[in-house]
Amino acid sequence: MNSAANQISAKLNYSFLENNQRKFQLDIDLDLPSKGITAVFGESGSGKTTLLRCLAGLEKGARGVLRVKGEVWQNERFTMPTHLRKVGYVFQEASLFPHLNVRENIKFGLRRITGDKNKTRYRQVVEQMGLKKFLDNHPNELSGGERQRVAIARALVVEPSVLLMDEPLVALDANRKREILPYLESLHETSELPIIYVTHSIDEVARLADYMVVMREGRAVGQGILSDVLEDTSSPVFLGEDMGVVIEAKVVERDSHWNLVRAEFDSGHLWVRDTGDKFGKKIRVRILARDISLALTNHSDTSIINRLRARVVSINDHTDPAMLLVNLALGNTIVIARISKRSASQLKIESGIEVWAQIKGVAILR
Amino acid sequence: MKFSSDDLTALYLTLELAATVTLILLLLGAPLAWWLARTQSWFKGPIGAVVALPLVLPPTVLGFYLLLAMGPNGPIGQVTQSIGIGTLAFTYPGLVFASVLYSLPFVVQPLQNAFEAIGDRPLEVAATLGAGKLKRFFFVGVPMAKPGFFTAAVLGFAHTVGEFGVVLMIGGNIPGETRVVSVQVYDHVEALAYGQAHQLALFLVLFSFAVLLLVYGIQRNSYRMLFRLNS
């Protein structure tokens, strides 16, 4: 099978009246990878949830072509009903069946098939989502985070071809989010299952996603590998204060005296706070544009530890007329710096010149 | 309280009729209520109105048209005669048929409300978990509407026990066949046997009160349960 047949390809069109007034049109043409987490990012009302519902076949009015891993789910003549699609769907609210306990909720999708394979699958999912001690509880006895874990287990146990998640963390408070994120990451690491993850939180995108689709007014205005989309300052992805890039790195050295570790990436290294990661541990860090300043020479008389040689690739306007966004190449890795127009003019920053990028803050995402 | 054997026959007939009608109504009413709760079809309004008609029509009107329809020249009478069971008027099966129509809204409406209260989400979840239309009905719709089924059964039963006009129109007054308690009370009053009328009437009052008490008790519990689930 070639790689195209493995993909999720969706050319869908769906228009409806929003609250019986405004016409909303979803019009998308996507080719999504067949593994890893694809974040569908956009403001509320941009059509993210509608897209997910169309993929699951929950919107009867959707037209177009949808192919998932070589299987046709929809084309001009045929629409596969939801219950025949091998899809897992995690809604915003856990939406557990109130008349069933946790065990029965998870087994709901298995009720038509029995056998050893299912037993193994069930045990594995319960284990992975840490639900063993809740099996006899009813949904109303669980916390929001626990309920959402049951919902994820319930969607996983039927071995879907694709897992659709609609802002699964949005209804949870910060502590519950922290509690559930490791489960999502473990899912990401241990399975080949493609996950399409709708969110309006750039933090969740930066932490979880491999691939990113940006939605605006029913259209996908940007899609690609996470770092490519994030570093594209000309794209319509407006992140404001959150503009920044994500870099995958590996822990290679520890400075226990100052509680720092050295994280090596493709084309350099960064000193970051020691969070107890072992050597060789892959980490993901995020560097915001507002945390990078530029200098023409390497200043050692500064509090900034991470100073990297970089080449200016391009200079782009910012929505703030006083500021500019400068794309910098650190070898193969692109980072973005946000500087004032005045500084750019004084330092004579232009494409192609060499500068020192002073990186004030590096956030470790995982 | 001591009932005459005629009274007992009438009581027994009434209970048998009400039980049969309730069972039939739950079997027919559940799919009908499910359809009414979920459809976006243009027919929803008209069908809902037809189901609710017995609520507003005088029972004698319903009984009158049923009598015509079941008669030898009526559409129902034609069918029953052609399959060789004669006409239904003044028979127990005819009474069952009429009672089903007469009590239909009392079963369909609580069920429809219960099904509507479930909302779309649990059914969408079930669909993504591989449940087709029938499975969604049996494994999500019916269990989640359990309190509605209870209310519907009790109301359907009680309302059938209480009917009078329709029975009089199409059932007549045949002991052991169509003479139900309400008709028996009427007979006692006509014969000026107030003592006997009292016994049966008081029994019906107590019975109805007990039933309604039960329904309201259960409903309060089910509201509380819904509330807890949403919080």
Image (spheres, helix red, strand yellow):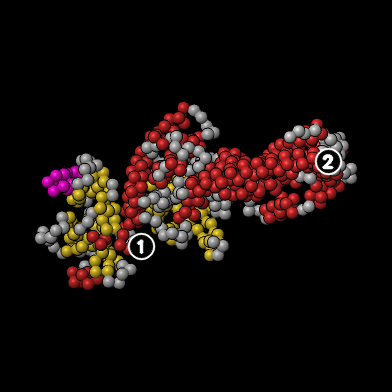
Q: Residue at x 76, y 36 (%)?
A: B11
**x and y percentages locating residue B39 in the rendered image:** 63, 51
Q: Residue at x 13, y 63 (%)?
A: A297
Q: Amino acid at mark 1?
A: Phe
Q: Residue at x 33, y 57 (%)?
A: A230
- The secondary structure that most of the magenta stretch takes on is strand
Q: Identify the secondary structure beneath mark 1.
A: loop
The answer to whether one can see residue B169 in this image is yes
Pointer 1: what residue? A238
Toward the left, the furthest residue is A301
Q: Is residue A334 magenta?
A: no
Toward the top, the furthest residue is A116
Q: Chain of mark 1?
A: A
The answer to whether one can see residue A354 in this image is no
**x and y percentages locating residue A41 in the rendered image:** 40, 55
**x and y percentages locating residue A258 in the rendered image:** 13, 48
Q: Amino acid at mark 2?
A: Ala
Q: Is residue A253 magenta?
A: yes
Pointer 2: what residue? B193
